[in-house]
Amino acid sequence: MLRPMKETTAKKRTWAEPYKIKMVELLRMTTREERLEAIRGAGYNTFLTRSRDVYIDLLTDSGTSAMSDRQWAGMMLGDEAYSGSENFYNLESVVQEYYGYKYLVPTHQGRGAEHLMSQILIKDGDHVPGNMYFTTTRLHQELAGGKFVDVIVDEAHDSASHFPFKGNVDLAKLDALVQEVGADRVPYLSLEGNVNMAGGQPFSMANLRELRAYCDKHGIPIMLDATRTIENAWFIREREEGYADKSVREILREICDMTDGCTMSAKKDALVNIGGFFCCNDDDVFRKAQNLVVVYEGLHTYGGLAGRDMEAMAQGIREATTEEHMAARVGQVYYLGRKLEDAGIPIVEPIGSHAIFIDARRFLPHIDQDDYPAQALAAEFFIEAGIRTMERGNVSAGRDPVTGENRHPKLELVRLTIPRRVYTQAHMDVVAEAVADVYARRDEIRGLKMVYEPEYLRFFQARFEPLS
Ligand code: F0G
């Protein structure tokens, strides 16, 4: 039995920040005319705008965290040696302690780890089941000859469902795939913590336990996308029976101990501006990863990172797993989410940990999905108040490699992603007001047509023009 969704954190004042501000970064204020010119110049793609034109940057929570005084102090301890840097050994012991895997291979960021893992584990024609796709993860699976198969629960595709564990895997879907293609064509189950594309939604420990039993029976490893798994651990504590008295650290270890390895973009949970890693427990997989990393990233004791980056990451992991940090992190996101709900804005429920996702289909019902409503809405938030957000819908989903058609995902979303430890409550108020102002004039908003489409991960560089 799940406990009902608690009205936690944000309603009380308990989420107040466990830090104070030592240095500030000045922002430039712009006029509406300047922003209109900027978004036109960027082909109505927020990824192509310049950050000097942005007032509140909610493009991503990736690499945008504010580091602590201790992390900056750690930067000064950078041991910039080509091999055997002291910072590598420190990071290795922290990752072993907090995540619990036997082996660590550092990479420059998450997709570097995905690349290694996909090349090592996937054979041509394999099927890789996962709890919803992530853009880079799926592309690396495809480039290695695999086919991604979505096995997330149906609730994840319904933005209005309040199901508390929308990140869960549907065992019947997984089993249907295994029966169809055979367990030997399933190299691993790709399991993401706090599923990004579903709105930052967690899986439950009960689901993971069932998955472990099923995968053991069929000899299928479980590889975790650990990018936001500390945040997933927080939600398990908040929502799952039997976890109220466990620490985030303990829950994180319990998750990792039930999986066979992970890829990690440390640019999220781990509070650094760059970095990632691959972990595993298998000797053979480790040896292959250690060998492949020198081809694509750098020697196996730095993987494309400076020594100082690894030091900041080790300290970031320690800070990110504290209760105070997580309360403030999730509390701030809930604060913004509740303000938007109160203003009647259609958002993905329940509120996730890293972002508020606005449902562009319900916000702009008059725009056809092939006229990219979420892309158009992201451009409007920028024009309205210099708030930079990201499309997570038809543009991000890309084309089906077989049919060449747009994939038309059920979720057509704009992500308002909150960087960690960066913005204040007043900034969140500005965001909520701006979104409400755009909502009030939503009938005037038109769709877009794509005028330039790059081959890979098109959302990053595609260009658009407004439909007349
Ligand atoms: N996995 C997940 C769940 C992610 O969200 C990301 C990145 C990656 C892997 C890849 O990691 O960027 O370090 O190479 N997400 C960013 C975002 C880009 O904005 O959601 P990376």
Image (cartoon, rainbow, N blue to C red):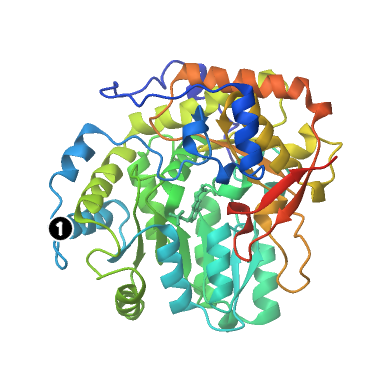
Give the image quarter of residue 189.
Answer: bottom right
Please state which of residues 60 and 175 is positioned toward the viewer in this rendering: 60
Quadrant location, the C terminus:
top right
> Picture coordinates of residue 132 (x, y %)?
62, 57
Give the image quarter of residue 339.
Answer: top right
Identified by mark 1, the residue type is Glu
User: Which residue is disc 1 drawn over?
Assistant: 80
Q: Could you say whether the residue bearing mark 1 is in a helix, strand or loop? A: loop
Q: State left or right for residue 9 relative to residue 48.
A: left
Give the image quarter of residue 465.
Answer: top right
> Picture coordinates of residue 129 (x, y %)?
60, 67
The residue located at (54%, 27%) in the rendering is 334
Q: State left or right for residue 271 relative to residue 343.
A: left
Q: Is residue 135 above or below residue 366?
A: below
Say whether residue 402 is visible: yes
> Picture coordinates of residue 22 (x, y %)?
25, 23
Please state which of residues 304 and 278 is positioned toward the viewer in this rendering: 304
The residue located at (50%, 58%) in the rendering is 209
Say whether residue 338 is visible: no
Q: State left or right for residue 72 relative to residue 387.
A: left
Q: Residues within 10 Å of mark 1 (few under 14, many from 20)?
A: some
> Picture coordinates of residue 414 (x, y %)?
65, 39
Q: Is residue 426 above or below residue 66?
A: above
